Image (cartoon, grey):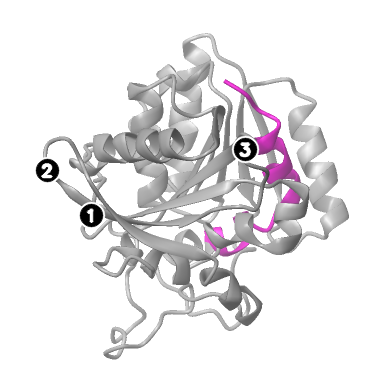
Amino acid sequence: MEKEHGPRKGGPRPGEKMPWQGIPRDMEPVVQRFSQHRFETADGHQMTYSLFEPEHAPGEKLPMVVFMHDMGACSADAKRTLTQGIGALVWAQEAEQKKRPCYVLAPQYEDKAAFDDFTVGWEAEATVELIRHVSGSHDVDERRIYGTGQSMGTMMLCELLIRHDDVFAACYLTAGQWDPARMAAIRDRNVWIMVSEGDGRAFPIMGECMEAVEAAGGRVARGHVSAKATDEEFTVFASDVLAQGARVQFTWLDGESVLEPDTPRFPAACHVHTWKWAYRIEPVRAWLFEQRL
């Protein structure tokens, strides 16, 4: 199973938050904009989830972003996925909603749902069932459902992309990897991948996945940038990647740029700090919303 949250030397103290956990103070009010619900699948599995519903005219169809959390956020608390990072919250911010109004769906997994042997649990198909339930009961444009996730969530999304070609218009995958032997299946999908160059698993294994995509006749655009780039530098970076004209974008954050000088170093440090930066890159968020099924 995925070992993504190796503790700092000596281990975390009971109840202690790790540096990659938690949200900025200005994001805390956004959590309250989500409501919590419980969903039962056709075969009787129970899943909780959080949902942000945007203001819109009755009958107006809007996109939906589906965020899938990492292993460190597994919990029976439906709000856990909202307070471990900004991957769900960033889309529901007031400023973001003014530019790109959308629903935001955040499934909550109680246990690990995707594993290092490239298998997934029952939660995979349950998530698809949940997406169809929410989109069918709300004013969701089913041609504009976007998947995004970090680490375990990325692994889950990779498997869903392989299994289903009619769910996601595009996906933004951060800090994760999947089975290179099967990832050629995404060659014609709209996918943007962001990993840290210092991530000892995601960077090399996802690189192998991209070689498989190309061997199957797909095109892959590549690019890299510092996690601490300016907004202008991120815009140039994204433009250069998209100018390559590929459906699949494989990009990485340079070296250990996801870390601060005082960040504790441990084997998975670059991995778990990737998504703190990845969701702040506005041109990637804009690209996502331009895609359609």
Name the residue at 50% across, 62% down: 270
Name the residue at 19% across, 42% down: 121
238 vs 195: above or below: above
User: Which residue bears the numbered disc 1?
Assistant: 112
Three-letter amino acid code at the position of disc 2? Gly
Q: Which of marks 1 and 2 is nearer the N terminus?
A: 2
Would you say the residues marked 2 and 3 are in contact, meaning their CB atoms lie under 8 Å apart?
Answer: no
Res 111 visible? yes
Quarter residue 131 falls in: top left
User: Which residue bears the numbered disc 2?
Assistant: 44
Three-letter amino acid code at the position of disc 1? Lys
Q: Is the magenta stretch mostly helix, strand or loop?
A: helix
Q: Nearer the viewer, residue 181 or 65?
A: 65
Location of residue 174 in the rendering, given as x and y in whole percent from the top left corner: 51, 48
Q: Which element carries disc 2, helix, strand or loop?
A: loop
Three-letter amino acid code at the position of disc 3? Leu
Span highlighted in magenta in the image: 274-293
Location of residue 79 in the rendering, given as x and y in whole percent from the top left corner: 38, 68
Q: Which of 26 and 84 is in front in this view?
A: 26
Q: Is 236 positioned to the left or the right of 131 in the image?
A: right
User: Which residue bears the numbered disc 3?
Assistant: 62
Give the alpha-carbon distance from disc 2 to disc 3, as whole Å.
30 Å
Mark 1 residue crowding within 10 angstroms, few (<14) / some (14–19) / many (20+): some
Location of residue 254 in the rendering, given as x and y in whole percent from the top left corner: 65, 54
Q: Which of marks 3 and 1 is nearer the N terminus?
A: 3
